Amino acid sequence: MTIQLSNRVQRVKPSATLAITAKAAELRASGRNIISLSVGEPDFDTPQAASEAGIEAIRSGFTRYTAVPGIPELRQEVADKFKRDNDLDYESENILVSTGGKQCIFNLLMAMIDAGDEVIIPAPYWVSYPDMVLLAEGKPVIVACLSEADFKLTAAQLEAAITPKTKLLFLNSPSNPTGMAYSWDDLAALGEVLRKHPHVAVASDDMYEKIIFNGKKFVTFAQVNPDLKERTITFNGVSKAYCMTGWRIGFCAASVQLIKAMSKIQGQSTSNPSSIAQKAALAALQGPTGALDEMVETYAKRRTWLVKALNNMDGVDCLMPDGAFYVFPSISGWLGKTTADGVVLEDDVMVCEWLLDAAGVALVPGTAFGSAGQVRFSYAVAQETLEDAIKRIADAVKTLIT
């Protein structure tokens, strides 16, 4: 018997970032010296207080099921965090804790989106947005955002993209993959458009909120547009700011009605997030911020060095990002050139495949983020590793034939 796969699963593609990471690991296991700049996770350790809280949870037997939307004390702490950091007033019943930010977003789409509903996704976008919309049987509406606008959605673009079928808009700031962040004025302009279209909700993905540079103040959509708060879903978590990617704790805030619906979806999929990880996340949110400040300072230095190094390379144009730990340069100057093996580099996917083979450096092609002709570098690696990677790439580029 041949098992017939669903149309749903055949519409989506595997995560490009995970695929590149897996290929790099495979080459490394075969003995190749591979540097991976494709991974989207901090290279710092989980805060000691969070780790100790997780260990204590195990030792004290806090290892059983919890309430599906999270333990009460963590939900309250998340509500307090939104007030403290974002001037957003929520009660614990407005909060859902999930197995990572990705599950929060998946819960939302499954709870909100019907077949044919349109979801506006500015590109470059985080790789999972369009495919999760497809899994919910919605229609991703991709809006290309230009480097001239710092890869951010403009009010005019938003107005042009909205139709009677539009149900949701995704915003991600600071962005994965560009590192660009929306300003107060940017979000206010988008809010002006959305006031005219009350059928459109906003999903604000703020996972990189804490990783922002040069004194730039982070602002989130509902904070700037408080009258639109009831149709805004704000996502965050501990993965990036607190170096807890493997703990798998994300959270979101929304109306009670929507949180109950999302909790229903979660209850029929993963149920509660890990009890142990919830205790660790609680300690992280309540703990000191010294380690976070040190991490952000380190990333700021790496960012400045990397952007300068890339812009000194022939064929590359790289903007200075506001936050996160990515840069997203154009490599259009490499396209159409021929490698030493006689292969013409026709697109960014071929460039990344060539660099993995010729230089032993793993990057993610911009096509995976809806933006061809770019590549994403993660600088969540040690400075010496970053310098080695750039030297390898520069040496490889010198071998290209025009």
Image (cartoon, rainbow, N blue to C red):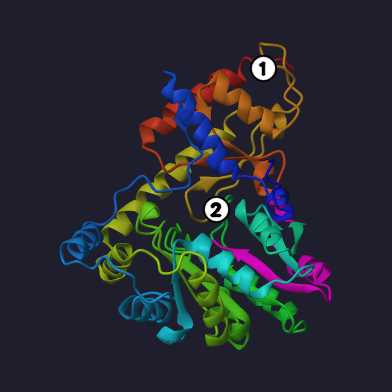
Nearest to the observer: residue 264 or residue 299 = 264
Toward which corner of the image does residue 385 lie, by quadrant? top left
Instruction: Tell me what residue is drawn at x 49 percent, y 36 percent.
Output: 37
**Residue 221: percent from left, percent from top:** 58, 75
Indicate whether 286 appears above or below 129: below
Residue 264 visible in the current orientation: yes
Q: Is residue 127 magenta?
A: no
Instruction: Tell me what residue is drawn at x 66 percent, y 42 percent.
Output: 366
SS class, disc 1:
loop
**Mark 2 — residue?**
179
Quadrant containing the N terminus in the rendered view: top right
**Mark 1 — residue?**
400
**Residue 341: percent from left, percent from top:** 67, 11
SS class, disc 2:
loop
Q: Residues within 10 Å of mark 1 (few under 14, many from 20)?
A: some
Residue 152 visible in the current orientation: no
Nearest to the observer: residue 178 or residue 310 = 178
Indicate whether 255 appears above or below 280: below
Instruction: Tell me what residue is drawn at x 76 percent, y 27 percent.
Output: 346
Is 244 displayed left or right of 147 in the figure? left
Is 384 displayed left or right of 113 in the figure? left
Q: Determine which of the numbered discs, if any, sits on residue 243 in the image.
A: none
Per the rendered image, the range of residues in magenta is: 144-173
Indicate whether 248 appears above or below 229: above
